[in-house]
């Protein structure tokens, strides 16, 4: 199995290199090929203990595991903490976390690249966020005697169907994992069905619920609105993590709302900032006045109600949620599986989302159950929902309070994960 897999990887090597070079040029970022082939770009700070390695594929996973990163650093203060990512934006965001000692790119899954990096880092334990199954990486870690923990594990409907079709391939891959900490009972059932040993599978709940939950103060909102040149007198609607096919609907909805709500102001945050130029063209075609986040400076003139702020940076989404009165979370009006509703909910901000929430089904269900947000089928329903919230500030406040309560009632995943990680480090597995 591994022989066939590695032959395929070698045949694909020119394609993989060409793809990463293309991405680096098109996105204006370094390809970091040396790093992806296992050469460590920096040296970890000296410590008495071996580092703990957390892998989070991109921005969403990095933000989701932040409570765990904080828990690890609080418990193992003197132990270096390493985080790896697959994407450039994930690396950029994760490298800014103060608890992280070193951020690097995850290696290509070639045995020589993986082996080189493992020998250089010598981690005491590897924590992989949300079921990233790389066969050679997991195998080399086991051969090196390094325990691997799947954290915040989940398996979407689409992934489950694919894993089941390749069950014979993935069963021996899963045998290299020391513990599976899954988000829910269904995720646990699915990983066992694919081939994970049942006695190694735990339901540890969702780390996303462990983010700090507290309403945003009036002073903080004013501070952020001033920072981003957002009009202080406006009611702010932020559309976060949007995708191609959504921005057009959201712009049309905004224009519809402005006819009756001239004091409304919109912040639009594409999931991938490199798409900002394409979104800007949409805004021009609709005749909307806008400004790019990257163009703002300390003495920028404030934008006006009816205008729009288009965000072309990374790592600031939570700040835009903080300054908002209403939030829409993207990837949900189109078939992208949705994004994390708990981020705005944790700030006491009512959240709206579309019907395509396959990757966050449990969270979407809880948000509706707690009445912390509302699902809309299309842009027309989105306009109706926003209009209702604009006309009912008491309802907005109630939904925000319900979001805080949701987080409070469903936390505790970090403590469960920490117990497993500590047992791995102590050799109790």
Image (cartoon, rainbow, N blue to C red):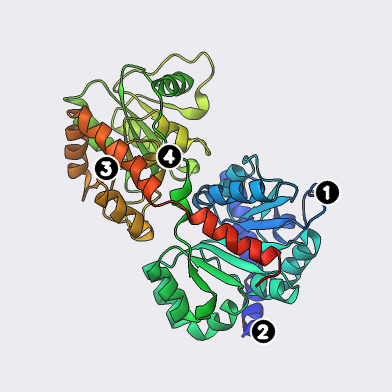
Residue 243 visible in this rendered orientation of the protein: no
Tell me the distance, in whole angstroms, between the alpha carbons under discs 3 and 1. Answer: 52 Å
Residue 138, given in percent of the width and then of the height, sits at 64, 72
The N terminus, quarter of image: bottom right
**Residue designated by label 3:** 249
Give the label, 1 or 4, closer to the camera: 4
Q: On the rendered structure, is 25 left or right of 123?
A: left
Of 356 and 279, nearer the camera is 356
**In the rendered structure, which disc, 1 or 4, sits on the residue that comes first in sequence?**
1
Earlier-in-chain disc, 4 versus 2 = 2
- Marks 1 and 4 sit apart, C-alpha to C-alpha, by 35 Å
SS for dot 2: helix
Q: Position of residue 5 (x, y in %)?
A: 62, 80
For the residue pair 149 and 318, the one nearer the viewer reads as: 149
Q: Whole-percent x and y of residue 356? A: 30, 56
| Residue at position x 73%, y 76% in the image | 143
- Residue on which disc 4 sits: 213
Q: Are marks 3 and 2 in contact (CB under 8 Å)?
A: no
| Residue at the disc numbered 1 | 46
> Vertically, is 349 above or below 46?
above
Query: Does the residue at mark 4 contact the one at mark 3 (Cβ under 8 Å)?
Result: no
Q: Measuring 25% from the left and 50% from the top, which residue is drawn there?
A: 368
Give how far apart the Cα atoms at labels 1 and 2 are. 37 Å
Determine which residue is flagged by label 2: 3
Mark 4 Cα-neighbour bin, 10 Å: few <14, some 14–19, many ≥20 = many
> Which residue corresponds to the image point at 59% horizontal and 57% vertical from the top-left?
418
How many numbered callouts?
4
Label 1 SS: loop
* Circle 3 crowding by C-alpha within 10 Å: few under 14, some 14–19, many from 20: some
């Amino acid at each position: 199995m591994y022989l066939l897999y590695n032959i395929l990887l070698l045949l694909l090597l020119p394609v993989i290199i060409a793809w990463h070079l293309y991405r680096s040029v098109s996105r204006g970022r370094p390809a970091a090929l040396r790093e992806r082939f296992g050469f460590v770009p920096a040296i970890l700070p000296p410590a008495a203990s071996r580092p703990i390695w957390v892998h989070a594929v991109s921005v969403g996973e990095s933000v989701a595991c932040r409570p765990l990163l904080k828990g690890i650093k609080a418990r193992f203060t003197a132990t270096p903490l390493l985080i790896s990512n697959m994407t450039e934006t994930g690396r950029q965001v994760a490298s800014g976390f103060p608890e992280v000692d070193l951020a690097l790119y995850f290696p290509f899954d070639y045995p020589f690249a993986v082996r080189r990096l493992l020998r250089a880092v010598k981690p005491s334990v590897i924590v992989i966020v949300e079921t990233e199954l790389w066969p050679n990486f997991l195998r080399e870690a086991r051969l090196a005697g390094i325990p691997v923990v799947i954290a915040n594990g989940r398996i979407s409907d689409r992934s489950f169907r694919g894993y089941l079709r390749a069950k014979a391939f993935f069963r021996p891959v899963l045998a290299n994992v020391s513990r599976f900490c899954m988000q829910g009972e269904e995720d646990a059932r699915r990983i066992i069905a694919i081939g994970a040993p049942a006695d190694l599978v735990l339901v540890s709940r969702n780390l996303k619920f462990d983010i700090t939950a507290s309403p945003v103060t009036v002073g903080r909102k004013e501070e952020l609105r001033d920072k981003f040149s957002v009009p202080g007198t406006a009611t702010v609607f932020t559309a976060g993590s949007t995708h191609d096919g959504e921005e057009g609907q959201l712009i049309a909805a905004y224009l519809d709302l402005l006819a009756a709500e001239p004091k409304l102001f919109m912040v639009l945050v594409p999931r991938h900032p490199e798409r900002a130029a394409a979104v800007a063209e949409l805004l021009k075609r609709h005749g909307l006045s806008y400004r790019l986040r990257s163009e703002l400076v300390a003495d920028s003139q404030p934008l006006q109600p009816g205008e729009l702020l288009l965000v072309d940076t990374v790592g600031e989404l939570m700040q835009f949620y903080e300054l908002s009165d209403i939030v829409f979370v993207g990837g949900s009006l189109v078939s992208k599986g949705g994004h994390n509703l708990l981020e705005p909910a944790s700030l006491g901000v009512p959240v709206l989302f579309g019907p395509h929430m396959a990757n966050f089904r449990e969270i979407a269900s809880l948000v509706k159950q707690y009445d912390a947000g509302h699902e809309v089928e299309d842009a027309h329903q989105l306009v109706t929902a926003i209009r209702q919230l604009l006309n009912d500030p008491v309802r907005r406040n109630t939904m925000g309070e319900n979001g805080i309560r949701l987080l409070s009632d469903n936390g505790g995943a970090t403590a469960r994960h920490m117990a497993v990680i500590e047992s791995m480090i102590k050799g109790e597995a």
